[in-house]
Image (spheres, coloured by chain):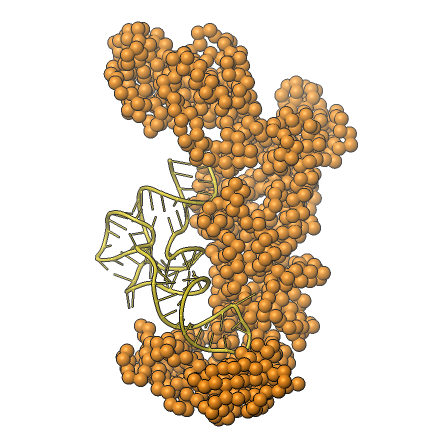
Chain colours: A orange, B yellow
Amino acid sequence: MFHEVNSKISFPQLEKDILRYWKEHNIFNKSVGVREGAKRYVFYEGPPTANGSPGIHHVISRLFKDAVCRYKTMKGYYVPRKAGWDTHGLPVELEVEDTLGFTNKAQIEEYGIAQFNQKCRESVFKYIKEWEAMTERIGYWLDMENPYITLDNGYIESCWWAIKQLWDKGLIYQGYKVTPHCPRCGTSLSSHEVALGYRDDAVDPSVYIKFKLDEMSLVHSEITDRQLVFKLGGLFSHKPAFFLAWTTTPWTLPGNTALAVAPDVEYAVVELEDECLILAKALLEHVGLDSYEVVETLKGNELVNATYEPLFNPHKYGVERRRPQTYFSPGEMSVPRILEVQEPKEDLTYHVITTDFVSIEEGTGIVHVAPAYGEVDFEAMLSNEPKVDFVHMVNLEGKLTGSYPFSGKFVKDADPLILEDLKSRGLLYRSEKITHTYPFCWRCESPLLYYAKEAWYIKTTAIKDRLIRGNKEINWYPDYIKYGRFGDWLENNVDWAVSRERYWGTPLNIWRCESCGNLECVGSVEELKAKPKLTVGSYQLEAFRDLHRPYVDEITFACPKCDGTMRRVPDVIDCWFDSGAMPIAQWHYPFENKEQFEQNFPADFICEAIDQTRGWFYSLHAISTLLFDRPCFKNVACLGHIVDAQGEKMSKSKNNVVDPWLVVDNYGADVLRWHLLTAAPGENVHRFSTQMVADTMRGDLLTLWNTYSFFVLYANIDHFVPQETTPSLSPSHLDNWIISELNRLIADMTRALDNYDLTSAARRAGDFVDELSNWYVRRSRRRFWKSEEDADKLAAYNTLYQCLVTLSKLLAPLVPFTAEEIYRNLVCSADSQAPESVHLTDFPLANEAKIDDRLSAEVSLATKIASLGRAARAKAGIKVRQPLDKAIITLTQESEMDALRKFASDVMDEINVKELKFVKDMLSEDMPHYAVANDEKHWVAVDTRLSPQLKAEGVSREIVRHIQTMRRAAGFDVADHIITYYQGEEQIIKVMKDFADYIKQETLSRELIEGLSPEGAYVEQHRISNSDVLLAVSKVD
RNA sequence: GGGCCAUUAGCUCAGUUGGUUAGAGCACGGUCCUGAUAAGACCGGGGUCUGUGGUUCGAGUCCACAAUGGCCCA
């Protein structure tokens, strides 16, 4: 006996029972364990940043990963799944800063790095609990007992090893580079972090500034026409000339050290009432000049080496002026290391230079260059001869230094003061506001400042070709990512800025001599411990037991060159490096588990959302290529993001975030899984709302459940026992058909799943469920009801049984709970030898020999004709319940007639006619006594004439239907026998008598008794075919 | 500002190499069917296939540009 199945299913309740079963019987570990020794399928879990509760967008990638791993397990692979947690990084620090009420780094240092990092550690573990609960609840099978955690010492040591490898290859360098800097967080942001925070509605000043030309300098300029030099010099001596430049960042103006022009663009010298302006001729209108006279035009390159007066001479305000010196050392890249301090100069002037980044689309065609605050500016400083000066008057908190009138102000607050100052000196030509795109810190929303700082880099550009070549070996899903988004990213590779001036992260394992500047990279704890004159400072207990700051900061040793003190550089490593190093670091490779590492490298499969193209997908690929010169994953699936029902991004500020717990508690994990799988292909953007999930529940899953519930109901009544072997060819066309469809389904799903196309696989299964329920079961009902225990009935049971059991296996990777319930009830309760879980079984293999295309075509024709027949009846307004004499069907091909003869009884049943006639001629719309319906190929006409006999038969069916409804209303079981009582008009009584056998059989009535019903019977009054009847039913014990 | 992806019925999606009248499911209205069913059947309303140009005998499909949304990069 199977356990009873209620058609009113609560998925959440069911799932809780299944979860308990899995836990108690250790099913996950068994499912992995039974495949031990088989071919490995290597999966890498992308570690979630555990700095917040899991959202619906986390659920989708986790369920895709789960489905693939479950599928591969059922296909016979050994698929261990090690969980991982990304625990370092700025997001975690910010969360802690928030709870402590901190707003800057100084407060952290005051509080104590040790205590601060301890808070970070606790904060991360708090969220891990939530993640574990959600992971388990949605049925994502993952080994959470042995996860890799990026904060572990072993993990950190593996990262150190990796950095050391790169160091030894000369791939790590320290350079000045202009990086996006968050003044609040006090750190540089990586490019992927910057990308998170662009806003296209940033309002900034849009100002035109006048830079006073030194008219004497025209002599040294590149103007070849000496006459012209004299002419302009004369003019400018009584009407001063200014270069007009445009900027949206006035705070960078004190850092201006050059003006850049485009070499081939024409510049105009414009004479106004009491001054002259120089700007690109094409932009005169744009700038808003109305009455002016163009005195002269010059090519940009003629202006080179003309000089102008600084807006703010740095020496007047106590700010240093520096000049770059390139420092070379053997075997290393040439990178600017030294910015030499320049002597103060009273009459300081700067040069006009040419660059290739001057736009004549906007501004004035003259670009203000501040090397400290722009990447291109910085590059221009280095590449120009003579070198351009470097003036830096903003500290790491984004406040101006020196003794300017606006010193101490935050840059954005200084903007208006600077403009005020310039205006008072007549140097502000025009001032407006502009709305444009500007990057903000993705966590704290401060405006980012482009800022020249020292930072440590990995020279990924050195292996760019290898990165591109490795990518050719990777299969991307969807495939256009490969040479599109990811390929483009690799083509435009820039060096990886890998250091962060923060606290909670993997410490950068580079030590520098305080005396001579000698640098050493330390690749392991052991290596560090062996250093000469090692001291651990004030943290005697913690040193080496915890490799984090601040303990590691105090570990010093003697410089091998000068015997000075080697002290670690203060930076920590970008947390993307942590996660990208997981192929090695999850095993503490190479310090231990060498075999584990080798067996699990590279991965067969990784899967994350599309935004990881430049995140984890890249950091994995880069590190793997840097260390091993090969890619570390073979297949990668990119999922689209989840947006709200309106297609807008989910965000806390829009208040449109959906809590996955609510969905799972109300509808169940399988419903959510099924929805996310079937609603749209994985790579699409997914619109999501709980209403959509509710709709999904009423679809395929409920139909499947009802089919299953139907089977169990009747199988139990008949004490059906599944047979070991099913007859190879059943005499029923219907059975052969659904078995054919089943095998086709297996083949299709296997193909789709092998191709990581879970959506097609799931939708295909949904189609099959529909066919099974709405044709196979619908057409087979009488075979289950009939009282004889014949071979046909057994064949029907066996066929449906086989379909449901196979379906449970096919669906197991996708909806693991529902599949488990069906499997356990249908298989385990009948066969004690069977595996105790569907997830321990093998994925079904298609038997191609049983796939019969012709049979498929025949059934689809039969359903088509049945539809047309019902449409014809509807046109005539005759209920399907009313039997009719015949239907005439036009078929043009002989094969179609054969097909319909095969399924004639089904079609006759569906249309409720006693005979089918096939003809080859087209029928016409207006046949007398017939109702007609047609599609492009077929015509069906039903005979609408009702003989008294047919009418009586119709009445009998009407009576049967009422009794059936009453049985249910009275709460009888489907197998209960009853006695039916009736009183009524003569016409009804006649039908009751004439069709007594039929009525008894259909309603399981032992007797039909004319007369009063006994006490306690269930009674209803009905009016059938204009006659009254009083019906009553009572159960027979 | 640049790149990639998407845009088809009220909603979610199919639409093969260009080829009759563009489909399905949900939702809605009507009718029917019903000893598994919260199911199902039939009929109906609802589409300038985002827009504008172009290629072609013929474009939802190919090309260009634009709009909107998403992602990525600046």
Q: Position of residue A923 (x, y in %)?
A: 28, 80
The percent coordinates of residue A137 (x first, y second) are 63, 55
For residue A13, what is the image quadrant? Answer: bottom right
Nearest the viewer among B18 and A654 is A654
Q: Measuring 44% from the left and 41% from the top, which residue is drawn there?
A: A488
Q: B42 or A235: which is nearer to us?
A: B42
Q: Quadrant of residue A701?
A: bottom right
Q: Residue at x 67, y 39 (%)?
A: A123
Image quarter in which the C terminus of chain A is found? bottom right
Quarter of the figure with the N terminus of chain A? bottom right
Q: On the rendered structure, is A18 left or right of B65?
A: right
Q: Is residue A825 left or right of residue B10?
A: right
Indicate whether B17 appears above or below A282.
below
Horizontal relation, residue A755 to residue A232: left or right: right
Residue A99, image x, y percentages = 65, 35
Q: Quadrant of residue A855?
A: bottom left
A219 shown above or below A805: above
Residue depicted at 49% across the width and 20% down the height: A414
Residue A759's place in the image compared with A363, above or below, is below
Can residue A599 be seen in this snapshot?
no
> Going by the picture, which residue comes out furthest to the right?
A541
- Report if residue A561 is visible in the image: yes
Picture residue at 71% right of the left edge, 26% below the top? A554
Position of residue A539 relative to residue A310, above or below, is: below
Give coordinates of residue A249: x percent, y percent: 44, 24
